[in-house]
Amino acid sequence: MDATPEKIKEILEQQVGQYKELLELLQKERLCLMDLDWEGVRELSKRKDTVVLKLRLLEQERVRLVEGLPISGGCAGEGLLSLRELEAKTGDAAFLTLRSQLICLLQSISELNEFNRILIDRTLVVVNGSLETLGLGGHAAGGHAPKGFLPGKGMAVSRNI
């Protein structure tokens, strides 16, 4: 594939689509976390992994295309042209529009990811409190920790979250 600004825009548009999908998955994950739907969280995690893999591949292709642009001056190792620089060199304002969309999506993803992390942390506090109440906070009766229990950590781990 020859590097052209149009092909770079196509990749950027695909990235925008994948980031939108990731944002939707994080919103669904938030609902699953609030409902304590662990099977839903597990399924969404698999779907998020797939989206992240696609995003990595798209980013690699975008980098390859930008490095191959005649206007980039063979910038490999010298840093890639930014979307602002691409707009300035090509006169195509679509690069700035895509840049704005990407920034907005990445900010939203970051905020929602942080919110979900807080939900998970709070759930772990409740689980650990329950384990303490059951007497499993540090040492199990008889000196044997239950399956999946991490001694000294006060936390149980299960594949069936």
Image: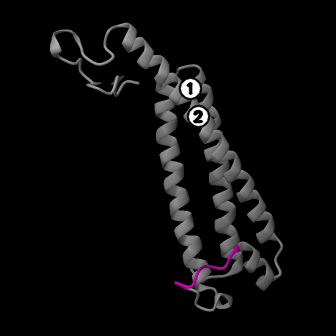
Q: At x 33% / y 16%, what residue is drawn? A: 137
Which residue position is annotated with label 2?
116
Residue 148: image location, x then y, percent: 27, 24
Residue 141: image location, x then y, percent: 21, 9
Residue 26: image location, x then y, percent: 61, 38
Query: Which residues, given as a range, are shown in magenta?
Result: 76-82
Which structural element holds mark 1? helix
Which structural element holds mark 2? helix
Q: Nearer the viewer, residue 15 or 80?
A: 80
Which residue position is annotated with label 1?
33
Instruction: Give amino acid for label 2.
Output: Asn
Camera-near label (2 vs 1) is 2
Instruction: Give amino acid for label 1.
Output: Leu
Q: Are marks 2 and 1 in contact (CB under 8 Å)?
A: yes
- Say whether residue 48 is left or right of residue 24: left
Q: At x 52% / y 52%, what residue is drawn? A: 52
Q: Which quadrant of the rendered structure holds the N terminus?
A: bottom right
For mark 2, does the 10 Å Cα neighbourhood hold few (<14), some (14 to 19), or many (20 or more) residues?
A: many
- Say whether residue 88 is left or right of residue 67: right
Q: At x 70% / y 79%, what residue is drawn? A: 5
Does the magenta portion include 77? yes
- In the displayed structure, would residue 79 be above or below residue 150? below
Could you say which disc has been placed on residue 59 in the image?
Answer: none
- Say whether residue 11 is left or right of residue 136: right
